[in-house]
């Protein structure tokens, strides 16, 4: 653990003691968790009083099936793994989450050589949170990406529209309830001379890893 981390953790506890949901050193980085209503004042304080002048990254998270061990399997056959889906399997040590959706901000203080992770939980049904563009202008496209992929609305964003998917895309592909094959498929129609949308023709399926062995069981 870097020498500054414990000091920074204690400083954050003292400054935001009345609004912090959690503060810890996770994955070798100081992490604070707050609710969405506090994001703007906290970010202003982190920039102006703690020296975090740079936003490195911003992303959304969907905790709807958090800690379900769907892909953990210890059984295998000669052709590959068995289907590793168990609807009842959960990790007993999983940390409970406060909401389905969260926005994570990774901050950097260049002058002090410090890093900080901020996780803000937002509402489940229609996630909304204040935009931090006024704090860090580079958040513009990061927030558009989180809106596109997770459907998180950023209040005060000057141009909140899709960034990675097309304008006619249905749903938000990084949500856990989004179908793997999608809702529609698109192709170019040479007769109509435009892109058309059609029902998905790919049947739903679960992909599992395949094990390829090179030993005497497969030699003649």
Image (spheres, grey):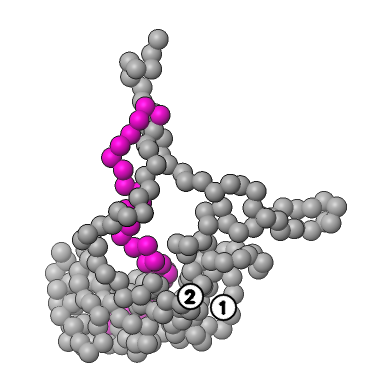
- Residue depicted at x 53% and y 66%: 172
- Marks 1 and 2 sit apart, C-alpha to C-alpha, by 10 Å
**In x, y percent, where is residue 61?**
40, 67
Q: Is 196 inside the magenta-drawn segment? A: no
Q: Quadrant of the C terminus?
A: top left
In this rendering, would 140 be left or right of 189?
Answer: left
Dot 1 crowding, Cα within 10 Å, few <14, some 14–19, many 20+: some
Q: Upstream in the sequence, badge 1 or badge 2?
A: 2
Element type at marker 2?
loop
Q: Residue at x 39, y 42 (%)?
A: 83
Q: Nearer the viewer, residue 50 or 77?
A: 77
Q: Is residue 166 visible?
A: yes
Residue at coordinates 26% horizontally, 76% vertically from top-left? Answer: 32
**Residue stretch rendered in magenta on the structure:** 50-79
Question: Quick check: is 65 in the magenta stretch?
Answer: yes
Kindly identify which residue carries mark 2: 152
Where disc 1 sits, the SS reads: loop
Image height check: is 44 above or below 127?
A: below
Q: Residue furthest front?
A: 88
* Residue ID for mark 1: 160
Front label number (1 vs 2):
2
- The quadrant of the picture occupied by the N terminus is bottom left
């Amino acid at each position: 653990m870097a020498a500054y981390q414990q000091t920074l953790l204690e400083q954050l506890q003292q400054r935001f003691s009345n609004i912090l949901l959690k503060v810890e050193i996770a994955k070798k980085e100081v992490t604070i968790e707050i609710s969405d209503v506090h994001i703007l004042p906290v970010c202003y304080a982190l920039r102006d009083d703690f020296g975090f002048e740079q936003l490195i990254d911003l992303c959304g998270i969907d905790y709807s099936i958090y800690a379900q061990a769907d892909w953990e399997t210890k059984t295998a056959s000669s052709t590959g793994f068995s289907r590793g889906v168990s609807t009842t399997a959960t990790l007993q040590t999983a940390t409970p989450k406060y909401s389905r959706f969260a926005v994570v901000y990774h901050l950097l203080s260049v002058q002090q050589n410090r890093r900080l992770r901020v996780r803000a939980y937002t509402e489940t049904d229609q996630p909304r949170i204040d935009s931090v563009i006024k704090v860090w202008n580079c958040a513009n496209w990061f927030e558009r990406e989180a809106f596109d992929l997770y459907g998180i609305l950023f209040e005060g964003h000057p141009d909140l529209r899709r960034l990675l998917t097309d304008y006619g895309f249905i749903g938000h592909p990084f949500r856990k309830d989004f179908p793997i094959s999608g809702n529609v498929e698109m192709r170019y129609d040479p007769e109509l001379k435009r892109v058309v949308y059609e029902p998905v023709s790919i049947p739903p399926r679960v992909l599992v890893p395949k094990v390829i062995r090179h030993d005497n069981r497969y030699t003649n």
